[in-house]
Amino acid sequence: MPLIIDCKGYTYYDGKLIPNKPSRYTAEEKLFILDNHPFFTGICPQCGHKFEQDNLPVHFDCPNPECGWIDDSV
């Protein structure tokens, strides 16, 4: 298993120094996504529909016809 070490904008990965790419999201936006996106929660953030854990979709558009939440992350 390769050794990964983070070092001020760069990461050592398997003995090679690799620059970290800037994220298009702020730290707050990343936390919001982790806390709310159905990929991580299994639940529609708008209506609370629970996605089947055994058959997860590629796009997490809510199947509830009364909701209409669309996954714009991809």
Image (spheres, rainbow, N blue to C red):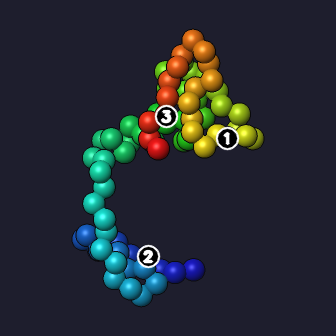
Give the residue at the far top of this rendering. Answer: 66
- Which amino acid type is marked by label 2? Ile
Instruction: Measure the alpha-carbon separation of dots 3 and 2.
Output: 32 Å
Per the image, the residue denoted by label 3 is 71
- Rendered position, 38 above or below 63: below
- Which amino acid type is marked by label 1? Leu
Q: Residue at x 60, y 43 (%)?
A: 58
Q: Are marks 3 and 2 in contact (CB under 8 Å)?
A: no
Q: Quadrant of residue 7?
A: bottom left
Residue 27 in sight here? no
Give how far across and how far down residue 73 sits, in percent: 44, 41
Q: Identify the mark at residue 1; answer none if there is no mark.
A: none
Q: Identify the mark at residue 4; answer none if there is no mark.
A: 2
Give how far across and how far down residue 51 sits, in percent: 65, 31
Residue 24 in sight here? yes
Mark 2 or mark 1, which is nearer the start of the sequence?
2
Mark 2 or mark 3, which is nearer the start of the sequence?
2
Q: Is residue 33 left or right of residue 57?
A: left
